[in-house]
Image (cartoon, rainbow, N blue to C red):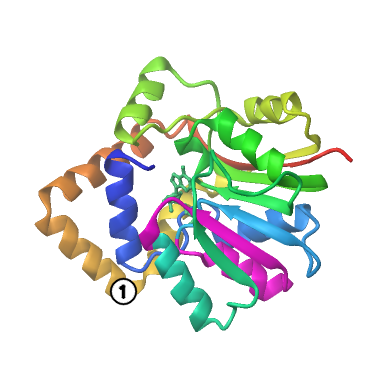
Amino acid sequence: MQKGIIASIDKVMYSCGLEILHPGGIEKTDEMAKQCNIDETKIVLDIGSGKGFTACYLAEKYKCQVIGIDLSGDMIDYSYQLAKKKKLTDKVSFKKMDATNLDYEDDFFDIVFSECVTVLLDQKKALKESIRVTKKGGFVADLEMIWKKPPIEELIKKTYDIWGGFKTVTLEEWQNVFIENGLTNIKPVDFSYKMLNMKKDMMKQIGLFGLIKMGFIILNKKDIRKAFIEYQKIFNDYVDYLGYGYIVGQKPH
Ligand SMILES: C[S@@+](CC[C@H](N)C(=O)[O-])C[C@H]1O[C@@H](n2cnc3c(N)ncnc32)[C@H](O)[C@@H]1O
């Protein structure tokens, strides 16, 4: 479960109209989906599906079946409403479930997606579960915040404490973990160059009304204001270390 200020910030951003809470936005989701050979014959699992935007997007664009799982009941309720609004309930469904204990049989999904969630979990356990439920020949894909270079101890501790258990690795280390877990045809993609656009992208998504609402919350809630300042300070102080990337691997036949 998400803890600490990251959870309260996510909640505020979602309540102000943010639909996607991962770096790179839907453009990177789409790129990653294509690397997984997505098409209408595929069954996809979206882990930590948040507001359900990725799941609905993939089902709408590629006509595939998608199941989104999230630990938050609120996120599941919201996602159902979105699927209903988009008339996608025959293609998309959502279930409350823990990413580290998936209630699916082995070799069930063609593609298992995680976006901006593995860094908050026991990574090895989560990846093992993702691989377990992926069909032989299927794809495991993960898009996360990464270290651009090996981080200093102080940064590891700060992000862990302030961002509610956040733990990430360099893209090279992700790649090694994928290899150690038997995945092949591994494609790591670093898109840290998009870092500067993230704030702009989020503001565009939220729109003027959302921004006014967020400003109002920040002004009136001292704990949220403090959380935003602490959150932002890490980005400003450690810009040389924080980056974004995704990695795709294939489960051998
Ligand atoms: C940063 S948000 C990302 C949401 C979505 N993937 C996106 O990109 O917009 C992380 C999501 O992971 C969910 N989550 C956290 N821990 C989880 C767990 N153990 N199992 C499943 N979902 C979890 C949270 O409830 C939240 O919706």
- Where does residue 211 sit, x and y in percent of width and height? 28, 67
* Residue found at x 59% / y 78%: 88
The stretch in magenta equals 51-74
- Quarter of the image containing the C terminus? top right
41 part of magenta stretch:
no
Relative to 67, 179 lies left or right:
right
Can you give x and y, in whole percent of width and height, for residue 116 in the image? 51, 46
Image side of residue 183 versus residue 158, left or right: right
Q: Label 1 sits on what residue type?
A: Leu
- Mark 1, Cα crowd under 10 Å, few <14 / some 14-19 / many 20+, is few
Q: Is residue 60 above or below residue 167?
A: below
Q: Position of residue 17 (x, y in %)?
A: 36, 69
53 inside magenta stretch: yes
Q: On screen, 30 above or below 207?
A: above
| Quadrant of residue 204 within the rendered picture | bottom left
Residue 174 is left or right of residue 214, and the answer is right
